[in-house]
Image (tube, rainbow, N blue to C red):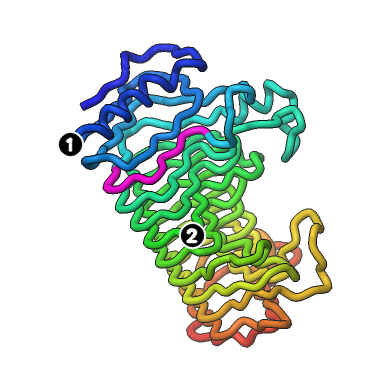
Amino acid sequence: MHELPPPLDLSYDRSDLPLLDAWKEACGSTTPSTIVIPEGTYLLSQATLEGPYKAPIEHQLEGNVKAATDPKAFKEPKWVSFLHVENFKLFGGGAFDGQRTASYKREGCEKHDFCSNLPIISKHNVRFDYLTNAMVQGITLRDSKQFHANVLGCKNITFEHEIVSAPKDSSNTDGIHIGRSDGVKIIDTYIKIGDDCILIGDGAKNLDITGVTCGPGHGISIGSLGKFANEEPVEGIKVSKCTLTDTSNGVRIKTWAGQFPGTASDIHFEDITVKNVSCSVLIDQKYCPWNKCKMDEESNVKLSNISFKNIHGTAALPEVVKLVCSGTFPCENVELADFDITFSGPDGPAKSECKNVKPIVTGK
């Protein structure tokens, strides 16, 4: 077992050394190791924890690890990174705290999405890059400067009983961002942020998301897709038994107007509870934030084999279902079943919009 020193206020220029030394020692061990960050508060400048190693490593986080508020402390646009490791477990009751609020107040740009006074800032609280057979359990990710958890190139990684939190007005603070990964599971996790609770990017396949509580935020999203050339297909996504409260979207798929080709298929949302959600079910193939695309062009991303089943609850706006598909590649085999979403307001009753799709509607 490798344990960091007792809790103390570590200086930013050397705070990463005890952790990196413990990681190096554990990597050299031929028997399984556990690295422990005990209860207390630690200030961590930046750390990349990289494999391979000779025997499995467990990382037990019980303390509260805080990022620097000074952007000059970051030499790269990331904070904590786990890279190229196998048979790994990160667990405990501790937290990674990005201190976004303190950073932005410090620079006087808390009201801006992008701030010129922050030239280099940690984009992600914690990165999980190219991990195989990993478990992340019971950890809190708090107040990230941008994405809270970024998952890239992973195979068989599970997130369970996570807590992800940031102010509801914090932009670009996605909870868990998944790209080009196979076999990701997110189970019984609570996400309260200012952007997408879970964002599924290109190359994601065989994902199972269940028991997630989301809100506020932008909901659970696939995409945006089609922005870049050579994006990999999205396939085999299941989102079930999730609850979304006070979100701008419930479950959605978004692809850019015009732009590049791609595919997304075998996507299923079921047993979803919505509470005061603006648009509960959304396919948006005219996605165009900041008006930086050609809205008169159609999306080149093909969507097929999609289902929305047992979606129930209350809506904040009358348009509870909006399926706007591509005129060039209309959506195929879209099924809606057992909807029970109510809206009460001066603009009622609830309504839906469908374009370039003939959904199969069954049940209520």
Q: Quadrant of residue 341?
A: bottom right
Q: Is residue 26 magenta?
A: no
Residue at the image point whose x is 72% and y is 82% from the top? 328
Give the structural element (helix, strand or loop) at label 1: loop
Along the line of sight, which residue is nearer the eye, 193 or 134? 134
Numbered circle sitting on residue 180:
2
Q: Is residue 168 left or right of residue 240?
A: right
Residue at the image point whose x is 43% and y is 71% from the top? 236
Along the line of sight, which residue is nearer the eye, 345 or 226? 226
- Whole-percent x and y of residue 268? 47, 72
- Whole-percent x and y of residue 10? 44, 13
Q: Quadrant of residue 94?
A: top left
Q: Residue furthest left?
A: 31
- Whole-percent x and y of residue 118? 70, 29
Q: Is residue 81 magenta?
A: yes
Residue under numbered circle 1: 30
Label 1 neighbour load within 10 Å: few <14, some 14-19, many 20+: few
Q: Is residue 70 left or right of residue 52?
A: right
Q: Amino acid at mark 2?
A: Arg
Q: How many marks?
A: 2
Residue at the image point whose x is 25% and y is 32% from the top? 28
Along the line of sight, which residue is nearer the eye, 128 or 265? 128
Give the structural element (helix, strand or loop) at label 2: loop
In what quadrant of the picture does the N terminus appear? top left
User: Which range of residues does the magenta coloring cover?
Assistant: 79-88
173 vs 39: above or below: below
32 vs 322: above or below: above
Residue at the image point whose x is 72% and y is 40% from the top? 113
Principal secondary structure, stretch drawn in magenta: strand
